[in-house]
Amino acid sequence: MKSRDLNFQNNYIILLIVGFLITSIIPLIMPTFQESLSIPYRLFVNIIGLVIFFRSILYKFTYKNFNTGFLFVIFWVIYLTRLFLDLYLFEIEIFEEQSKSYYILSALSIVFFPTISLYSFNWSKVDFEYILKWLYGLLLFALLIGLILRNNEDNELRSTGGVFMGVLNYGHYGATLSILSFYYIFVRRSYKIFKVIYVFGFFLGLTTVFITSSKSPIIALGVVILLYYLVFFDLKKIIILLILLIIGYFYFIDFYELVSKYYPNAFLQRFIYSLTEDQSFSGRENLLMTGWQEFVEKPFFGSAFLIQNEKFIGSYPHNLIIESFMALGILGGFIFIWYLKKCLIITRSHIKKNSNLVWIAFLFLQYFIFGMFSGNIFSSELFWIFSLILILTKPEKFRLKHK
């Protein structure tokens, strides 16, 4: 492939990961844009992705990628078939506020078309160092602008402050910045002067999580850090983790109170409530159990891609594994489990080998946790993107020269 095409692919990966955040921040910077640019962004990403895919379809590595990532294709062929049958043949019940085209466009334009374009990449030529640097810089810039220009006029304790996206997505972008900052500070070597920036980035990401009052981003951040130290076991690193936990224990509340002074939020209240109150009859728990019950009632082919119980009509279980069984039955559920198992094995391998794609493994874990708490199959694009990148890359080819 030509170097121009390779550079284009590098930039396209960056666009897939952080483009939605950038387009959602623009209305804060340029008030003339009164609405989100997410629709033009999605359209642009789809067109570019399909162009890349069809231009590269004759290359040998494209077919090799399909052989490597066949589970993704099989799962999504089954899922899209289910989606179209449910909407246009069985005519299942959906949310009154949504249209049939919403689900079709979400599945195709948010997840399937952008992700399927990754099969056309020559992954041995992709410059992950370039991608990481630009990704980190854009995240830092966007979240800092979002904080500086934040709109607090609505006095809501859980909001994005005028950024055109959901609070959970925004909170997880904050967690992503903190995870990448952790990677730069503790996993790989970097100049001390840059570590000041990475420390700032870590706390900026944490601040973003706090002001969205979202629990799953902070859980994902904690799990990623803990799993890194457990898998890449080293006495020195374990001691560092213990020191961090001790420091965090004494200064976490102080930092949170400082953030809350300028950006009122309900993060701590919601987190404490979830730990101390009985959650057996919470909405999330009921959705989870309802999704499982619908699978049990129709285990072979699944019930529908959305919950059909009258109480939760048109919703989803907020858990990718339960949703895969509910929507696709035993076959689809086990294909998803098989796919997930491969991703987790590769994740462990990247961490164990200390590869320069550890950060991809970290972000896969983060968005997998997001999917297990709040996500759905048809719009969890970053889970699918990072998982497929893991599948299509081989850990032994991406080993760090320094430790």
Image (tube, rainbow, N blue to C red):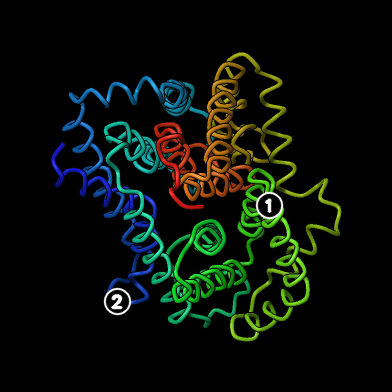
Residue to which mark 1 is pinned? 226
Q: Secondary structure at mark 2?
A: loop
Numbered label attached to residue 30: 2
Question: Where is the N terminus found, in terms of image quarters?
Answer: top left
Estimate the x, y position of residue 23 in percent, counting from the top left: 33, 62
The crowd level at tag 1 (other Cα within 10 Å; few <14, some 14-19, many 20+) is few
Give the label on residue 391, or none. Answer: none
Above or below, 331 against 403 in this view is above
Horizontally, residue 25 falls left or right of residue 71, namely left
Residue depicted at 49% across the width and 22% down the height: 90
Front position in the image: 98 or 72: 72
Q: Which residue is nearer to you in this view: 139 or 30?
A: 139
Q: Is residue 100 something that shows in the picture?
A: no
Q: Position of residue 302 (x, y in %)?
A: 59, 21
Query: Which quarter of the figure has residue 372?
Result: top right
Q: Is residue 347 left or right of residue 222?
A: left
Q: Nearer the viewer, residue 257 or 360?
A: 360
Q: Which SS class for mark 1?
A: helix
Mark 2 vs mark 1: in front: 1
Rendered residue at 33%/70% (across/down): 26
Image quarter of residue 109: top left
Q: Amino acid at mark 1?
A: Leu
- Residues 193 and 176: in front is 193
In primary-sequence order, the first of circles 2 and 1 is: 2
Q: What distance separates the C-alpha of mark 2 from that of mark 1?
A: 40 Å
Q: Is residue 313 above or below residue 41?
A: above
Report the side of 217 relative to 240 (left or right). left
